[in-house]
Image (cartoon, rainbow, N blue to C red):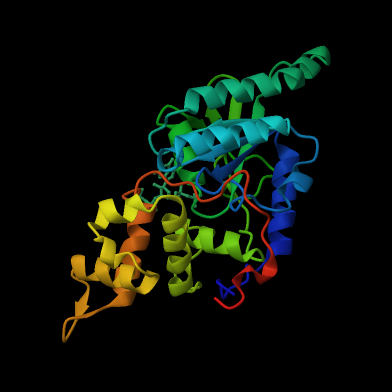
Amino acid sequence: PVVHWFPGHMAKATRMITEYIKKVDVVIELLDARIPRSSANPVIIELIGQKPHIVLLNKADLADPKATKEWTEFFMNKGITVLSIDSKSGKGNKKLLSTVERLSKPIIDRWMAKGIRSRSVRTIILGIPNVGKSTLINSLAGSAATRTANKAGHTRGQQWVKIGKNLELLDTPGVLWPKLEDQRAAARLAMTGAISDDVYDLEHVIKQLITHLLTNEPQILVERYKLKETEMTDIDTIIESIGRRRGCLVSGGIVDFDKARRIILQDYRNGKLGVITLDRVDEEPYYADDNEGS
Ligand code: G4P
């Protein structure tokens, strides 16, 4: 497999998320806009049940805007509320808050009918590692936010951050585990940094990334690394040429392939290769034997 790792404590994580979800009125699920399918957690929908749910396509600044539009339509067609945001810049926060407000209106109306007026709407941010949960919480909380004291019954250390007049956000995000059984998804999760760098096969992951670029946007490699036509023959030659350009050499002028691969990966993650969405709406489903022989 691409990833030599199994996320532990899945049962415990499921239990914790189930507990969190019970306490909130609206659930915010963060996905990576570059991999909206691969970054989704398989069991989340079951856990959310009937609660209002917002899908946020985060890191939209790193994704292809055309693909983000297609993904937005994909979720909308399923009746799911969806927004694309860039939580690093805080762009989209206002829209998110007004969407939470819109989704919670029926809940507030029910409370009003029962005579409950003082309650805040509560929400939580869920997502796989590195998708931007903490960045979003900090960006939403800002400096003006006030943190409410721990109340009995809440896990120690967790607090509700008051945002605006009527909304409280749990300051600890719900961490979901990534989808590793699907090898194509696993490789993309590794590319985007959702999986720790020491548990996947870098050679395989870079091979997948370069193959994706060659298939979908070959000019990116030429432009970024000034590759010549003669260097675009096969994956190893591409990596070697990039390594040579970037000075990844060991004694004897031999290219350090591993170092070159890491540079390519960093460039992708930092957006230096441009805005690239890896998951496509219309992609063929993945089959387990796709990687055979590779
Ligand atoms: P997590 O809580 O879900 O694990 O993710 P976290 O907020 O720690 O964010 C993980 C990385 O993703 C951070 O980068 C963060 O800055 C970056 N990030 C979060 N949201 C966005 C976004 O909308 N756009 C972009 N481009 N990046 C985003 P890092 O490299 O770990 O830290 P730093 O270099 O930004 O300080």
Tell me where residue 216 appears, x and y as whole percent.
46, 51
Q: Residue at x 27, y 78 (%)?
A: 256
Which quadrant holds the C terminus? Answer: bottom right
Residue 289 higher or lower than 272, as above or below:
below
The part of the image, by quadrant, that contains residue 176 is: bottom right
Residue 254 shows in the view: yes
Q: Give the x, y percent position of residue 64.
A: 45, 40
- Residue 200 falls left or right of residue 40: left
Q: Say which of 187 and 119 sits in front.
A: 187
Quadrant of the image occupied by residue 143: top left
Front position in the image: 110 or 261: 261
Foreground pick, 99 / 62: 62
In the rendered image, the residue lying farthest to the bottom is 252
| Residue under the point 80% across and 18% down | 110
> Which residue reaches farthest left?
252
Instruction: Tell me: residue 147, above or below residue 282.
Output: above
Residue 101 x, y percent position in the rendering: 63, 21
The residue furthest right is: 114
- Residue 25 visible (yes or no): no
Name the residue rendered at 72%, 39% in the picture.
23
What residue is shown at x 57% (from left), y 46% (from top)?
A: 280
